[in-house]
Amino acid sequence: MDENKTSDLNSTVTNKDSKSKMITGSAWMTAGSITSRILGAIYIIPWVTWLGAYSNEANALYAQGYNIYNLFLVIATAGIPSAISKLVAHYNGINQYGVSRRLYHSGMYVAMAMGIICTTVMMFGARLMDNGDPNMIPVIRSLAWAILIIPGMSITRGFLQGYNWMAPSAISQFIEQLFRVIYMLAATYFVMKIQKGSWVTAVSQSTFAAFIGAIGAVLVLGIAWMRHQREMNMLVAQGEVNEEVSTRSLIFKIIYQSIPFIIIESGVTIFQLIDQYTFKRMMPLVGHFTKYQMDVTYALFAFNANKLYMIVISLASALAATVIPLLATARAQNDQEDMRKQIQNVLLLFYFVMIPAALGLSAVAQQIYTVFYRYDAAGVVVLQFAAFISIPLGLYTVAAAMMQGISENKRMMKFLGIGLLVKLIIQFPCIWAFQGLGPLIATGIAMFVINYLILHSFNMEFTLRFDKMAVPTNQILAYSLVMFVGTKLVMLLIGHFVSPYGRYTAFFSLIPGVIVGVVIYLYLILKSRLADRLLGPRVERLRTIMHIK
C-alpha cells in the first residue's frame, strides 16, 4: 500500500515537473520566437517606405525567394535539429549522456554535408527554380550562403533543447533576427536612397541578410555551449556508458529519424510553394489579369498578411519546440499517463494563446496593416481572413510536433499527404470562386483535415479527456470573443474621430485598441481562475497587481 502511495506521489511530482518544464521552456521559446518575429515584421515599415512604388513587387519577389529558401533549409538541416532534440532527450532520459554527445558530433557531420550539397544546388540550379521570373535568380543565389552555416547552428540548438535548455535557442533567434534586420535595412537604404539603384538589388541584399543573421546566432550559441560545457561533461562522466551504440548506427538513426522530419516540418512551406507555382498559372484561367496585378495580389496574401499572422503562429512554433523533447522522454520511459497529460496541456495552452491572438489581430487588422504597408482595402480584408486561418496553421505546427514526439512519424506523413492532396484538389475551385483569398481558403480547409486526423489519432491511442478540456476550451473561446467585440468597438469609436487611413493616426489608434483587448482578456482569465489552471500559481502575483479578487 505504501509502495503504491509512493509511486503515485512520484508520478504526481513527475507530471508537475514535466508541466513546469513545458511552461518554462514555452516561455523562453515564445519570448524568443515572438520578439524575433516582431522584429522581422517591424523592419517592413522603413523597408516598404524606401522601396516606394516597387514595394508590392519587391514583397512578392522576397516571398517567392524565401519559400524556396525555406524548403532547402529544411532539406539542408534534414530535420536534424528536431531529430537531435528528440534523440538527445531519449538518451538523457535513460542516463546515457555520452551517447547524446556522440549523437551531436555525428549530426554535425551529416548537417555540414547536406549544407554544402544544398548550397551548390541553389547556386547552380537557380535558373531552374525562377518560375519564369529572371529577377528570382540573384535572390535565390544570395540566400544560398546562409544554407552553409545554418545547419550546424540548428544542430546546436536542437542539442541544447534536448537538455531542456531553451534560453540559448531563444536568445540566438533574437540575435539572428537583429543582425539580419540591421544589415537588410542598411543595405536597402544604401541601394535605394544613396545609390538610387535597382529594387531587385535591394531585395537580393535583403535576402543575403539571412547569412549575416546566422553568424550572429552562431556567436550566441558558442557562448552558451562554453557556459554549459562543465555541466555537460559532469553528466557524461556520471552517466551510464553504452559502447554498443556505434557512430555509424547513430548517423543511421539520425538520418532515419530525419526523413520524416524533413517532410513534416516542410509541410507549411510545401503549401506555400503550391501557391507560388499554381497561383499565377490559375489566375489567367479565371479572369484577365496583368502580371503586375497578379504580383500585387500574390504579395497581399503570401507576404503582407503572412508576415503579420506568422507572429501569431510563432506562438505555436514555440510550444512545438518545447514539447518534442518532453514527449520523447516520456515515450522513452513508457509513461502513457504523462504523455496523455502533456498532450492535453499543450492543446489547452495552444488554445489559451492562439485563439485570442488570432481574434485580436483580426480586430485591429485595418490599423496594423496601415502601419506596416499603408492603407489598402484589399490588403486589410486578406489580413482579417488570414488571422483566422492562422489558427489551423498553428495547430498543425503543434500537433505535428507532438506526433513526432511520440514517434508516430509514418502516420503523420500519411496525414500530411492527405492534406496536400486536399489542397491540390480544391486549389483551383477556391481561386476560381474567391481569387486572392482562394489559396488561403484551400490551405485552411486542408489544414483542418490534417488536424482532425491527428487529434482523432491521439484520442484513439491515449483516450484524451475532451470532457475535462471542454470547460477551459469554451472559456477561452468565450473570453476571446468578448475581447474581440470590445476591441472592435473601441477601434470603430476611435475611427469616428481619427482617420484610420494615415500611418501615424493608425499607429496611435492601434495602441488603445491593443491595450483594451489585452486588459479585457487578462481580467477575464484572472477573475475566472482560468490562468491559474493552465499556468499554475505563479499568476497570483499578476492578480494582486491588477487588484482582482
Image (cartoon, grey):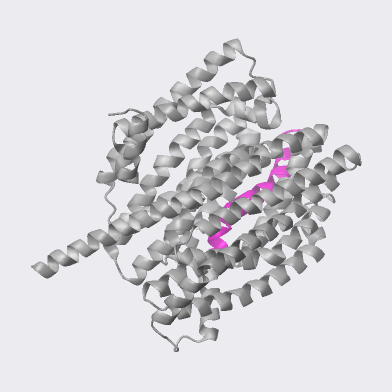
Q: Which residue corresponds to the image point at 85% horizontal and 47% vertical from the top-left?
A: 201
- Residue 80 is left or right of residue 144, and the answer is left
- Residue 25 is left or right of residue 184, and the answer is left
Q: Which residue occupies the extreme top position in the image?
A: 497
The spot of residue 521 in percent (x, y) is 40, 30
The spot of residue 107 in percent (x, y) is 58, 74
The spot of residue 382 in percent (x, y) is 61, 32
The answer to which of 11 and 544 lies nearer the viewer is 544
From this view, report whether residue 121 is shown above or below residue 245. Answer: above
Q: Judge whether residue 151 is colored magenta.
A: no
Res. 239 in view: no
Q: Which residue corresponds to the image point at 33% horizontal and 33% vertical from the top-left?
A: 544
- Residue 475 is left or right of residue 230, and the answer is left
Res. 547 in view: yes
Task: Place residue 138 in its image quadrant.
Answer: bottom right
Q: Which residues are magenta?
A: 261-290
